[in-house]
Image (cartoon, helix red, strand yellow):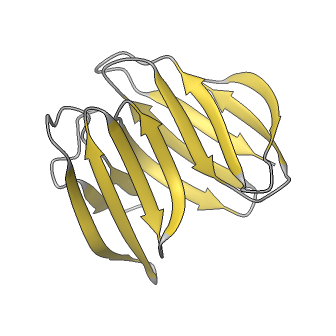
Amino acid sequence: MAVIEELLRAEKDGTVSFGNYELPQKAKKENFAHEGDILKVKTFKDITKLECNDLFLYESVPGTTVTHYKEAEQGVSFEVEGAEDAQITLGMEENTAYNVVVNGKSMGQMTTGVGGKLSFSVELQPGTPATVRVER
């Protein structure tokens, strides 16, 4: 998997890919139309953040590259790559329990609070994407 040079792109399968953890300085792409929504990404080596219609969807510290990000009724799925382990925070439904699965291994059930944020860590190595599924 490679970084997303254009910062944010739509894939043929209806998903989006975003982020470039190799950038030394912040870069952003705004007003990206995708399936009736407006997306915005901010990314560089220290952080990657995705918003949809001005609502928080994804954040990683340090920065990451995400491919095939897809939201569905039951949760979110994507592949993520970075230079080192990352703390990922997702904007999900408030007060809802989710099962987090990384590379086929369950990290257990986690419950969001009033803000709907769900945070977990992923072990990453450059050039090796991790597969993440977060399901109700």
Residue at coordinates 73% horizontally, 23% vertically from top-left?
Answer: 107
Q: Is residue 73 left or right of residue 14?
A: right
How many numbered dots are placed on residues in this image?
0
**Residue 18 in the image, given as x and y percentages of width and height:** 33, 51
Residue at coordinates 68% horizontally, 43% vertically from top-left?
Answer: 118
Residue at coordinates 35% horizontally, 52% vertically from top-left?
Answer: 17
Residue at coordinates 29% horizontally, 19% vertically from top-left?
Answer: 126
Q: Quadrant of the N terminus?
A: top left
Q: For residue 11, say whether it is visible.
A: no
**Front-most of residues 77 and 119:** 119
**Residue 56 in the image, given as x and y percentages of width and height:** 53, 60
Q: For residue 121, say whether it is visible.
A: yes
18 shown above or below 37: above
63 shown above or below 15: above
Q: Based on the displayed image, in which of its 4 quarters is residue 108 positioned?
A: top right
Return the residue found at the far bottom: 36
**Residue 9 in the image, given as x and y percentages of width and height:** 28, 60
**Front-most of residues 3 and 91:** 91
Q: Is residue 39 left or right of residue 121?
A: left
26 shown above or below 1: below
